[in-house]
Image: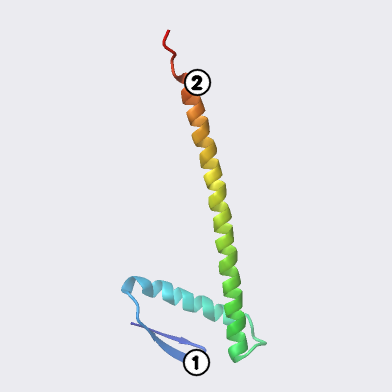
Amino acid sequence: MLTLTLMNHTFEIPCEAHEREKLIEAATLLEDKLDQLPGLKGESKVLMVALNLCFDYLQLKEDTTQYSLRLEDQLDTVINQVANESKQETPTNV
């Protein structure tokens, strides 16, 4: 169980021991994001931070997908080059 306090609210979060550090890191990130919006209060502040975090998540997801596709293309190119080279090196029976 992990106890976190965010915006004067205390939360008891059930978690495994290996998840504690990541949850603390997430809470720290959330607090930092909340502090970046001093002009907003309460629910408006939380919703704006949630929107920004969701946007960042979707951007990273898209970037990761594009990166994965580029790696797959590069891997296909290398595999084809190796296959072509091995065909050229195969001795022919005379």
Q: Which residue is drawn at 59% across and 79% down?
A: 49
Q: In which quarter of the image is residue 65?
A: bottom right
Q: Which amino acid does label 2 sit on?
A: Gln
Q: How crowded is mark 1: few (under 14 residues within 10 Å), some or many (20 or more)?
A: few
Q: Which residue is drawn at 53% across and 46% down?
A: 71
User: Which residue is tagged 2?
Assistant: 88
Residue 38 appears left or right of 76: right
Q: Nearer the viewer, residue 42 or 32?
A: 42
Q: Which amino acid does label 1 sit on?
A: Asn
Q: Position of residue 82 (x, y in %)?
A: 49, 30
Q: Which of 89 and 92 is in front in this view?
A: 92
The mark found on residue 40 in the picture is none
Q: Residue at x 40, y 73 (%)?
A: 21
Residue ranking furthest to the top: 94
Q: Quadrant of residue 4?
A: bottom left
User: Which residue is tagged 1?
Assistant: 8
Q: Position of residue 45 (x, y in %)?
A: 61, 86
| First in sequence: mark 2 vs mark 1 | 1
Establish if 40 lies above or below 70.
Answer: below
